[in-house]
Image (spheres, helix red, strand yellow):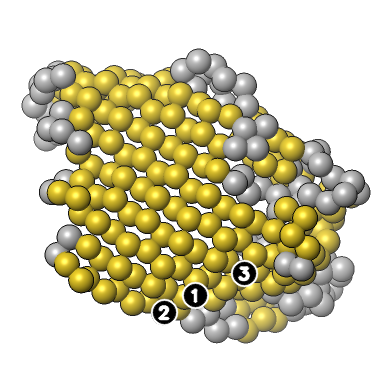
């Protein structure tokens, strides 16, 4: 990874970062239906941000953020067309920053953080007519050396589940949910406890095969018009979820 910003009249300072991002992985298959894997990777984010737009004289001399991730997992083909997955991971982040609660337009360096979590998934056909796709994740994200400080934008629990049932070759319905537990808008400390509440959103869909070549699909998001807040940039910049909305799509095969 390299960052090369040369001085010019509009940008009188610069910083150059040159890093190596190693990645390793190993897959072992003890049985035809079971795969085990382990991976390790390291990456960097320039202090100027992923769009290279926020480099300032305050941040210029700070080293890039470093991300080190270790993960182990498994995949089990329960039967043809139905698979379950599981993964355990640990993400260490050094030289981490967060919006300053006292001044959201600036960032502060918080040092080292650690996120430990698990992810579970199930995808495929339960029966010839019933398809399912679901996942659950748990994340415990804290400041290294101070377990009482929780990181922002990291809900402990997240879950999604989508079901589709085809009554016949022409007509089917779908219903699903998205759940997210509460999270802090900015890094939590003794004086900052702004919390986004958890929410559960229900979505639905209708599928209609008019002919062998013409398919019509209607999707409704947030079916019960749930009011929720999906994420935030800081304590003063919180994003609300979309209200009930729908779309219709038509696909034709030639």
Label 2 SS: strand
Which mark is in front, 2 or 3? 3
Question: Which residue is identified by label 3?
Answer: 92
CA distance separating discs 2 and 3 = 16 Å
CA distance separating discs 1 and 3 = 11 Å
Q: Are marks 2 and 1 in contact (CB under 8 Å)?
A: yes
Earlier residue among tags 2 and 3: 2
How crowded pointer 3 is (Cα within 10 Å; few <14, some 14-19, many 20+) is rated as some
Label 3 SS: strand
CA distance separating discs 2 and 1 = 6 Å
Q: Nearer the viewer, residue 109 or 117?
A: 117
Task: Residue at 48% x, 48% y: name it.
Answer: 137
In the rendered view, would you say 82 is above or below 215?
below
Where is residue 253? Give x, y as percent.
Answer: 14, 33
Q: Which quadrant would residue 125 be assigned to in this image?
A: top left
Where is residue 19? Give x, y as percent.
Answer: 60, 83
Q: Which quadrant would residue 232 be assigned to in this image?
A: top right
- Which circle marks residue 41 in the picture? 1
Where is residue 16? Give x, y as percent.
Answer: 70, 81
Task: Residue at 20% x, 30% y: name it.
Answer: 130
How crowded pointer 1 is (Cα within 10 Å; few <14, some 14-19, many 20+) is rated as some
**93 to the left or right of 201:** right
Question: Which residue is identified by label 2?
Answer: 24
In the rendered view, would you say 128 is above or below 172?
below
């Amino acid at each position: 990874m390299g960052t090369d910003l040369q001085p010019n009249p509009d940008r009188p300072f610069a910083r150059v970062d040159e890093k190596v991002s190693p990645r390793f992985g190993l897959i072992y298959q003890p049985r035809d239906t079971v795969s085990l894997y382990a991976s390790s990777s390291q990456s960097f984010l320039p202090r100027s941000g992923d769009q290279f737009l926020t480099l300032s004289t305050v941040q210029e001399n700070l080293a890039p953020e470093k991300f080190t991730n270790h993960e182990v997992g498994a995949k089990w083909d329960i039967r043809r067309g139905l698979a379950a997955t599981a993964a355990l991971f640990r993400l260490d982040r050094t030289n981490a920053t967060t919006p300053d609660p006292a001044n959201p337009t600036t960032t502060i360096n918080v040092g080292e953080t650690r996120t430990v979590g698990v992810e579970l998934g199930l995808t495929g056909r339960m029966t010839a007519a019933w398809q399912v796709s679901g996942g659950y994740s748990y994340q415990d994200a804290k400041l290294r050396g101070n377990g009482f400080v929780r990181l922002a934008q990291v809900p402990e629990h997240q879950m999604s589940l989508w079901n589709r049932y085809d009554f016949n070759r022409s007509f089917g319905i779908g219903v699903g949910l998205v759940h997210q537990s509460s999270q802090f808008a900015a890094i939590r400390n003794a004086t900052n406890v702004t919390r986004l509440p958890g929410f559960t959103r229900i979505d639905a869909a209708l599928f209609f095969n008019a002919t062998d070549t013409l398919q019509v699909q209607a999707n409704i998001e947030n079916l019960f018009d749930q009011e929720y807040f999906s994420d935030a940039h800081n304590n003063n910049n919180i994003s609300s979820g979309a209200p009930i909305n729908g779309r219709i799509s038509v696909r034709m095969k030639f």
